[in-house]
Amino acid sequence: MLKPHSQHSVISNAIAASLLGLVLTGCSPADTATNVNTLAEVSQLNKVAPGSPGTEPTWAFSGKTGIGTSYEPYINGQYQDQAANPVSRVWFSVAQGILTETMFGLIHNAQLKELQFIISGNGFVDTEKDNTISTIEYLDTDDQGRPQSLAYKIINKDIEGKYQIEKHIFTDPDRNSLMMNVTFSVFEAGITPHLYVNPHIDNSGANDIAAIEGKALVAHTSDTNSTVMTIKSDVDFVHASAGFVGSSDGIIDLQDNGKLDSLYQTTSNTNQGGNVALTAQYPTLTKANDSLSFNLAIGFAQDKASSLATAQATLDAGYDAVKQAYLGDEQHIGWKDYLASLTPLPSMSANTTDNGKLLYASALVLKAQEDKTHAGALIASLSNPWGDTVSAKVGSTGYKAVWPRDFYQCAMAFLAMGDTQTPKVAFEYLKKVQVSQQTPGFAGTPGWFLQKTHVDGEIEWVGVQLDQTAMPIMLGWKLWQAGVLTDAEIISWYQDMLKPAADFLVTGGKVKLDWNETNISPPSTQQERWEEQAGFSPSTTAAIIAGLVAANDIGVLAQDRDAKTYLALAKQLQSQLATTMVTTAGLLGETNNQGQVAPYYVRISPNGNPNTEEKLLDNNGKPGLDQRLILDGGFLELVRYGVVDAQDPVIKNSVMLIDNQQLEDNLRVKYEFTAKDGSKVPGYRRYGNDGYGEDTVTGFSYAENGNTEDQRGRVWPFFTGERGHYELALATAEGNLAPDRKKALINTYVQGMETFANKGLMLPEQAWDGVGNPTRYDYKMGDGTNSATPLAWTHAEYVKLVRSMTDEQVWDFYPVVKQLAQ
């Protein structure tokens, strides 16, 4: 009997591989020439694979342990292909020990779902993803062990000790290609490796065509403008086959007898697509302790000839040259050069508890998540949330898209680590996603910023979120104060982009775009920062006030007589906080001897009447509850930006309630985790009654079988950073930031965020909080979940927290806002 596969293996990985030349070390393969001839004969008999269209395609596991792309310098604030500096537009991700979503063209345009190895031997067939124990490390580190590039070494060891696979993965900065160096070692005789590739060309897995063409594996779609992916290797394959996933692919073929013997040349001769896979057999390692080493390249282009030439050119350049160019050498500005330009990083590293390892990784990760066609387009995450349970039949950007809120966090992090170019280019990009009378399909009041767009500005979601309209103003002010934008530049941007945004924050107005036809009356927002509720939100209002004050400050410079209205409204909103979003009739607060409830901030008040029993909207499978029951740490943004003092009694009351771990799990926000030094560090959920997460009873992914009431949003690690910023502000306000207290803050909050990083130093959106079914992945406390890793916002918050600790003041603080209360 052959070792059975898990269900996940069958839905697994695919690659387009081709192979030239043999590099065997101590290996005695079978008669390769005979097998190649057999392949040619069988291909004529079995030209087209049966089983169309294959199983329903999905994306890959979203908990990435690594992402990568080549570093490319700007030329005049843009990415420009030049003979001396070609731009490589390829991104990749790694999860569960294998290569997962790999993009070419625009950053959201996936071409490959998964690439892994299938291993057959005496009585077993393994898939690399399901039957090995994986480790990952960075190929390039400095003498402190800090990453210097996004190149990875992955070692996958068979759980039974029969074989080991070592892979080095990075992209070619001179070409649209990815290189992988593989060393396959066996510890018993008669083991055969097979490369298995599941293409998802042009961001969909349902319309692909796969073929064996010469010594290359090729995939494209039935569309005449399709991207073409070609995989080549410098070791000849013995057999190769194209098939449909779940019916005629290599996994199905190998499972019956361990042999790749039902061979097909292509999946279509009629231009009919499906969910396809390519499988290529390498020579059998006939002796124990044999090894097989080879390079493979995945080339992308808009036609077959160029795709093949790209892959071949990367192989011809060779492993050493491509890897060194990726890192940086005399002819190439690489990742190490980018890190060297971030002059604050060495001093910031002294305020971490891992010597700066996560800090350097965060710098790399943030820069990697920028599109290279539309410079400055910063995405939320190079992942599709809960991807392996999400259909890939129709293209989706997932988190590979622009939200101005996440965008702001990232731009401020770049500034914090000493990169002034990227946030300036990013700020200029924002004009592309601001609503104007020229926005297709729009009618109404312009000036606000689109909820979510593709990196090219294509509209995806159209909700109005007032924090996303305020944050571009806040960013512009910060860049001006830092000297990144001159007086003349900020005045120009004020007139062109920031004043319309500020005007919208004042007046709001009617909005009509796609499904969204509404009337916005600031500060009531159609959606708060979690994109789920309407009303008066502390976090949204904090951004509105900061944005208005910043607009006034720039407006004064621009000699705009209307600017004073921004300041007047900011003062008014600040004075109304207590009546519009602080409850004095709370259901969670402590009461005094007179029966009075200690006031606290609610998550959001739908109509600005926080003392009523009004319910929030149903969301994510959860029924809406009384507004006074739902806690959300968003009120801390009021302190961060300078709207409210850290010592404010209502802020302190609200912090006390957030920290209450005796609340039932549905309403509870704070959980504790164990750091590397054995101490306890805090983690926080977004808010009570959050349903954006796994089902506590079945363990299913979010919305895997539709939304359920048992879904539960987990801990989001960047809240540990938000709390750290508050505690720093509190210590500063109290005049008590002695060395011991600062060290304690670093050990609690900086180390707290470091605790959530995975083995590849990727920080997640959500981490497992131990409540309910640990799912098919058997999560342990603090593990990043399958929601989205790495999340740019989490890495940005970590960078900003370290910078704040280094400066001993909050990085996102706005002194002009603080002056409102004076």
Image (cartoon, helix red, strand yellow):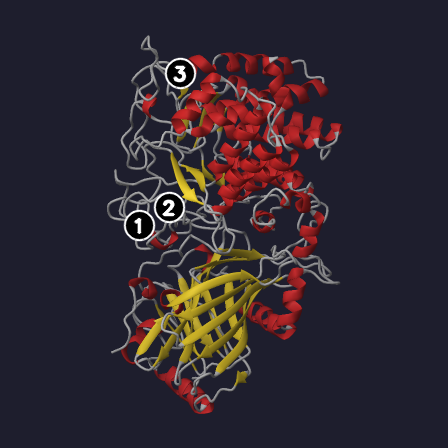
Q: Is residue 22 left or right of residue 710?
A: right
**Where is the C terminus found, in terms of image quarters?**
top right
SS assignment at label 1: loop
Residue placed at 64% from the left, 19% from the top?
A: 552
**Where is the N terminus found, in terms of image quarters?**
bottom left
Q: Position of residue 406 (x, y in %)?
A: 52, 38
Marks 1 and 3, how far apart at CA: 36 Å
> Which residue is the extreme one toward the front?
740
> Which residue is the extreme one toward the top?
594
* Disc number placed over residue 774 in the picture, else none: 1
Residue placed at 75% from the left, 31% from the top?
A: 486
SS assignment at label 2: loop
Q: Which residue is mark 2?
A: 768
Which class describes the residues within 10 Å of circle 2: few (<14), some (14-19), or many (20+)?
Answer: many
Q: Nearer the N terminus, badge 1 or badge 2?
A: 2
Marks 1 and 2, how far apart at CA: 8 Å
Q: Position of residue 383 (x, y in %)?
A: 46, 50
The residue type indicated by label 2 comes to Trp
Residue placed at 55% from the left, 83% from the top?
A: 21
Q: Which residue is mark 3?
A: 599
The residue type indicated by label 1 comes to Pro
The residue type indicated by label 3 comes to Pro
Q: Nearer the N terminus, badge 2 or badge 3?
A: 3
